[in-house]
Image (cartoon, rainbow, N blue to C red):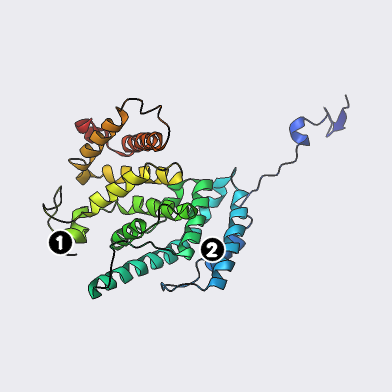
Amino acid sequence: CVYSLVGGAWCGPPTMEENVAASEAAFFEEKEEALELLERISVGGGGAGEVETADLDAIRLDVARFVKIIEKYQEQSTLLDPHLERMMAPLTGRAGAIIRGFHGRHLAQREDGGEAFPFQCAREPQLHCIFQIVYQLCRCRGQKCVAKFFSHEVSDLEPTLFMLQSQDRHDHGSWETRYGLLLWLSMLVMVPFDIYTIDSSVGGGDLVPASSSPPPGSSASLVSSIVTICRDFLRDSGPTRDAAAICLASLLTRPDMETVTLKEFLGLAEEILSQPGAMQEAGTQIFEVTGVLMTLAAVFKKGHRDRLLAVA
């Protein structure tokens, strides 16, 4: 055992902690490079035009480089917090332009009478690259911290839902797009207006009096469309199921949804969970059970206790 005289006092040998070299980062070291990569990934400005194939190849390389940077901060994700808004701004700006452009083309085709099917599979490679980045940010920092930087514009609600409805669910290589759209939708459904007043399917795009349910005889309402597609995604086995549960919980805990829509979902959840062997069956049923349980947990976490007691 070796002791030395330091400053007039005898000091013992260095401890194990003093011998360990620290490798933790003190700040987001690659901030400037990451922001530059995101600007290049979001190339296209405010328009909704398609990106050339050569540019897409470069964008995919930039995505791979950004993912490598972000993975370094898995254990210190809070270092990203001061920069999340700047990182999300170009991504959401370009994604919004692509989504609105796709929806606008659909409306134009419908007016011209040239639309054969209500929903045609949307293939937007750049949008997929953007949502790959969004997923990686959520994976590192958590969806709650990332989702709040999505657009909250009321006008984005129907285009985002339409883009989600136009996705090919059998394309397992583009699940990040569906995940990002569901997460974005979870923010948009919390708009501080009665959803039926902004639903073009019940009033031809005009404002209608606020009510707790759509007028009888109307086409599929905005609310029923959101509930239906989220319920479908609850049967998935990956992150899209988690995003669908969050989106559905955000919708069901709205004050104007608790009288009818929430009660209907709780009845459906009871029916699914009470099926014999629901927790033991293999295949998609167990995924749906898991999705329903995740939705219920999110509803109880987001909702107001007094309101939930009324439907419990």
> Element type at marker 2?
helix
Amino acid marked by disc 1: Gly
Residue 13, numbered circle: none
Q: Are marks 2 and 1 in contact (CB under 8 Å)?
A: no
Q: Residues within 10 Å of mark 1 (few under 14, many from 20)?
A: some
In the foreground, 116 or 299: 116
Q: Position of residue 21 (x, y in %)?
A: 75, 41
Q: Can the viewer see residue 32 in this picture?
A: no
Residue 203, numbered circle: 1
Q: Is 194 on the left or on the right of 246, as rendered? A: left
Q: Position of residue 90 (x, y in %)?
A: 47, 64
Residue 38, numbered circle: 2
**16 up-or-down from 96: above or below:** above
Q: Position of residue 239 (x, y in %)?
A: 45, 45
Q: Residue at the location (23% across, 73% down)?
A: 111
Q: Position of residue 62 (x, y in %)?
A: 59, 63
